[in-house]
Amino acid sequence: MAGSQRPVPPVGPRSKPAAPTRVEPPLRKPPQLMYLSRKEEEEGSQTSAADQNETTLSLATPAPAATRPVSAPQAAAVSRSDDERFETASLEGLTMADLMGAADGPSRQGRSSRSAGSAPAAASSSRPARTVDDFDFDEEAFLAALDENEPVGATGDVVTGTVISAESDGVYVDIGGKAPGFMPKAEAGLGVIGNLKERFPKGQPVEVLVTREQNADGMVTISARALALRHSWERVKQLEADGKVVQVKVSGFNRGGVTCDLEGLRGFIPRSQLQNGENHEQLVGTSFAVAFLEVNVDTRKLVLSEKRAASASLLAQLEVGQLVDGQVVSVKPYGFFVDLGGVSGLLHQSSITGVHLRDIRQAFTQGERLRALVTQIDPSRGRIALNTALLETQPGELLTAKETVMAEAEDRANRARLLLRQHEQEAG
């Protein structure tokens, strides 16, 4: 039939095509590493091939929850301590010679007996023994090298050398070191030296002072000027100790005094110690005698006095036991200062009379003249000690018969000198 329709089958719900199943690859565990010592490796080599394959498979596949039991050799290796693994007990009591491989020493034998499972004694004895001679050590050559490179001269030492050459900036002197000593031009001596070659000809012996020890090149810095200054201070100190009077020439002046040269040193004379201190600038170029007030080597201080020189010349004319005339110029609680004609002496209260004085003015007053014995002289300090008690025939006579004591002072002084000599002999 033209108008007929084909029957259509009922359409039900369509089912979706099944998705292809995806096979998940098995999870792979990262390979694990195990440390095996050589000894463990030897022990492991004795195991069966099946055990080795099983161990390899167990490392490559994921580990199950339950762990595989460890073999007996591995458990023993884990349980061993570091001391046993490295055999530290076998190192006890060993000397350096044992460690270096001494041939048949007792320590080596003891080590072999103490270490279990160590190499045979024959293998250790096969090493060549090493001795000190193997290092080619020569003690004499070593000491000679030390002597050759020993520094020459420490700072402050006095050395003697020979002039090698004189240059424009200084002088080179052979003082026995690996390098010559160098003396700068400013240290060539006291004063100004114009021509070093004339002053220091080649081959001339010279004594110098080391002012700086050797540098990296072995050169030592030396000075003739420093040595001359040291000798000058030594001579000046001795002159002061002896109480000497010296002649100086004034080289300059300032507001406080004048300057002069003494033994190559610069000295100073204060205005108060000059006889003509008011016009001290006119003294430049003149010469006169001075004595020492202060000599200090550490501070380089040299102070002189013209007035003390005048006193020192008078001191040189005095001697112990001499009877002198003087005048009381000052009264102190401890005694009298007596002018002896340009120099003062001290009459101490203990030397006035043989009895105790409540007031020393009971014996003398200021301005009164007296006669006394010289009992002590100190030239370096300019001090003179006087005594009137020695002129008494009995203690306290000076208070009751002072005129008689002074009138008979000459005769009484002779007796007093005998007493002084006896005291000196007893003391000596």
Image (cartoon, rainbow, N blue to C red):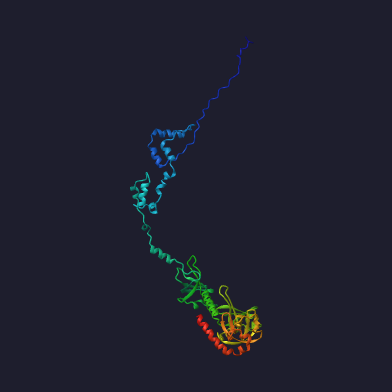
Q: Residue at x 43, y 65 (%)?
A: 146
Residue positioned most to the top: 1
Number of marks in picture: 0
The quarter holding residue 389 reads bottom right
Q: Is residue 405 left or right of residue 134?
A: right
Residue 25 at x, y = what percent?
A: 50, 30
Q: In this orientation, which residue lies closer to the viewer: 338 or 4?
A: 338
The reply to whether residue 241 is visible in this rendering is: yes
The quarter holding residue 321 reads bottom right
Quarter placement of the N terminus: top right
Q: Residue at x 40, y 63 (%)?
A: 142
The reply to whether residue 193 is visible in this rendering is: no
Q: Is residue 105 left or right of residue 349?
A: left
Q: In this orientation, which residue lies closer to the viewer: 118 or 134?
A: 118
Q: Residue at x 34, y 50 (%)?
A: 125
Q: In this orientation, which residue lies closer to the viewer: 2 or 391?
A: 391
Q: Residue at x 40, y 40 (%)?
A: 41
Residue 194 at x, y = what percent?
A: 53, 78
Q: In this orientation, which residue lies closer to the viewer: 415 or 147?
A: 415
Residue 210 at x, y = what percent?
A: 50, 71
The quarter holding residue 137 reads bottom left
Q: Is residue 50 left or right of residue 370?
A: left
In the rendered image, the vertical position of residue 395 relative to residue 70, given as above or below: below
Q: Is residue 222 left or right of residue 401?
A: left
In the rendered image, the vertical position of residue 71 relative to residue 246, given as above or below: above
